[in-house]
Amino acid sequence: MGRTSNVFARIEPEIKVQAEAVLNRLGIPMSNAVDMFLRQVIIHRGIPFELKLAEGRPLFVGELSKEELDKEIAKGVNDIENGNVYSAEQVSEEMKRLYDI
């Protein structure tokens, strides 16, 4: 492989754990996955997957008008009132199932 160089990245701990779980199942060390990604950046001369903003939707709560924020909050309250909710345990179990953590 020749000489190597170090790359340091700050990653949210939970993202790192979940990614490592997937990569471990694939038998790919994290450093190899990063190398593969960077090689794809070179081949594609950019990010090797599509990046786009959600159409017609603000990205942050701070971008919503008061009316839009009120509407979104009302949708959430409506979901709660109609029982469209999940317990923390259900969410945790689903995360474990999906990400083998």
Image (cartoon, rainbow, N blue to C red):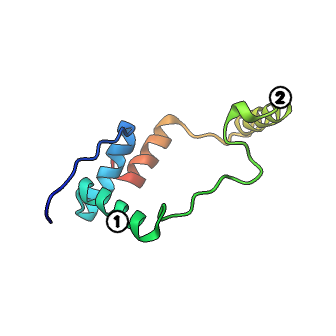
Give the x, y percent position of residue 49.
51, 64
Q: Secondary structure at mark 1?
A: helix
Which residue is disc 2 drawn over?
66
Q: Name the image quarter holding residue 84.
A: top right
Residue at 38%, 48% in the rendered image: 96
Residue at 15%, 58% in the rendered image: 3
Q: Is residue 86 above or below residue 2?
A: above
Residue 39 disc label = 1
Judged from this view, the residue extending furthest toward the bottom is 43
How many C-alpha atoms fall within 10 Å of the one at disc 2: few (<14), some, or many (≥20)? Answer: few
Q: CA distance from mark 1 to mark 2?
A: 45 Å
Q: Name the image quarter holding residue 36.
A: bottom left
Judged from this view, the residue extending furthest toward the left is 2
Q: Amino acid at mark 1?
A: Arg
Residue at 22%, 57% in the rendered image: 29
Q: Is residue 28 above or below residue 74?
A: below
